[in-house]
């Protein structure tokens, strides 16, 4: 079987990275759960435009800046404002900010799909930027309509958004809700949760290994080295967790 090569580079990039980043490109170019394939392509482009733009304070919304957002943009202004805030000022989010968009301007599910995509695009693009590689290019938009699939028993509990009990064999399938909150966060839109953790597992450690012996090696690093890097990155980024 021919190996997937997402990046053309002499760097020793693990095959898991090539494969999961290629899968992400296909995923973003496909009809989502609530956004069309064309809209999802626009979400990718808007995340990149937000990251590459001149800095704006978090309280300035792109839709309020004259000439910044084309009048015929395929995405609603609420989605664009959310994308820019998530991309550039994620540590400033508050529940009142969230409630200013959801549910009147964006449904919870459409918001969660955006959150998942922003997180995935940020992961892959920062990887490419850090190694001076070309960012992922998307294939043409896929045919079809959003599935609009909603999980059963979704409710607001420990998150601002509704979350659903999930069966995750890495944890305890006998008790579907017995997973860390961070693994439940995108459960309202299952496809984004799955794609997010596919990427995380390839870059970090597989979900079932989160609680393993810290003396065990993963990839080319020891687990303790991975956690040191992760902790430092979280501190620099003001990560809530």
Image (spheres, rainbow, N blue to C red):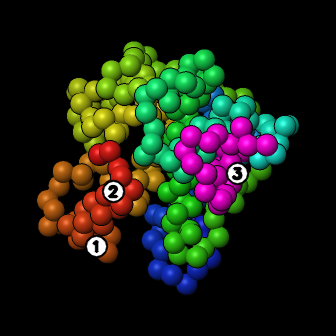
Give the spatial CA distance, label 3 vs label 2: 26 Å
Residue that label 2 marks: 234
Q: Nearer the viewer, residue 208 or 48?
A: 48
Within 10 angstroms of label 3, few (less than 14), some, or many (20 or more) residues?
few
SS at circle 1: strand
Left-right relation of 104 to 175: right
Residue 162 visible in the picture: yes
Give the spatial CA distance, label 2 vs label 1: 18 Å
Magenta stretch holds residue 43: yes
Residue at 45 percent across and 38 percent down: it is 93
> Mark 2 or mark 1: which is in front?
2
- The outermost residue toward the right is 72
Residue 2 visible in the picture: no
Pointer 3 or 1: first along the chain: 3
Image quadrant in which the N terminus is located: bottom right
Q: Based on the displayed image, in which of its 4 quarters is residue 186 positioned? A: top left
Give the spatial CA distance, label 3 vs label 1: 33 Å
Q: Which residues are magenta?
A: 42-66
SS at circle 2: helix
Pointer 2 or 1: first along the chain: 1
Q: Nearer the viewer, residue 85 or 227?
A: 85
Left-right relation of 90 to 106: left
> Mark 3 or mark 1: which is in front?
3
Q: Nearer the viewer, residue 146 or 48?
A: 48
Magenta stretch holds residue 80: no
Residue that label 3 marks: 45
- Mark 3 in CB contact with mark 1 (< 8 angstroms): no
| Image coords of residue 132 (percent x, y) | 58, 76
Pointer 3 or 2: first along the chain: 3
Question: Which circle marks residue 221 in the picture?
Answer: 1
Left-right relation of 179 to 38: left
């Amino acid at each position: 079987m021919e190996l997937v090569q997402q990046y053309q580079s002499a760097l020793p990039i693990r095959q898991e990275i090539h494969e999961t980043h290629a899968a992400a490109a296909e995923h973003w170019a496909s009809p989502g759960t609530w956004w069309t394939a064309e809209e999802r392509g626009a979400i990718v482009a808007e995340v990149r435009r937000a990251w590459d733009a001149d800095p704006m304070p978090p309280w300035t919304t792109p839709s309020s800046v004259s000439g910044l957002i084309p009048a015929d943009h395929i995405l609603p202004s609420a989605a664009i404002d959310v994308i820019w805030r998530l991309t550039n000022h994620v540590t400033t989010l508050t529940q009142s900010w969230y409630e200013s968009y959801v549910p009147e301007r964006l449904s919870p599910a459409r918001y969660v799909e955006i959150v998942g995509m922003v997180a995935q695009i940020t992961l892959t693009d920062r990887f490419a930027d850090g190694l001076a590689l070309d960012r992922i290019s998307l294939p043409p938009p896929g045919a079809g309509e959003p599935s609009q699939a909603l999980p059963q028993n979704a409710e607001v509990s420990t998150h601002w958004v509704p979350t659903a009990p999930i069966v995750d064999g890495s944890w305890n399938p006998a008790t579907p809700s017995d997973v860390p909150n961070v693994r439940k966060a995108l459960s309202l839109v299952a496809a984004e949760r799955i794609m997010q953790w596919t990427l995380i597992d390839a870059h970090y450690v597989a979900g079932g290994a989160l609680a393993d012996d810290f003396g065990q090696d993963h990839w080319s690093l020891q687990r303790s080295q991975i956690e040191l890097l992760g902790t430092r990155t979280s501190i620099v980024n003001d990560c809530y967790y």
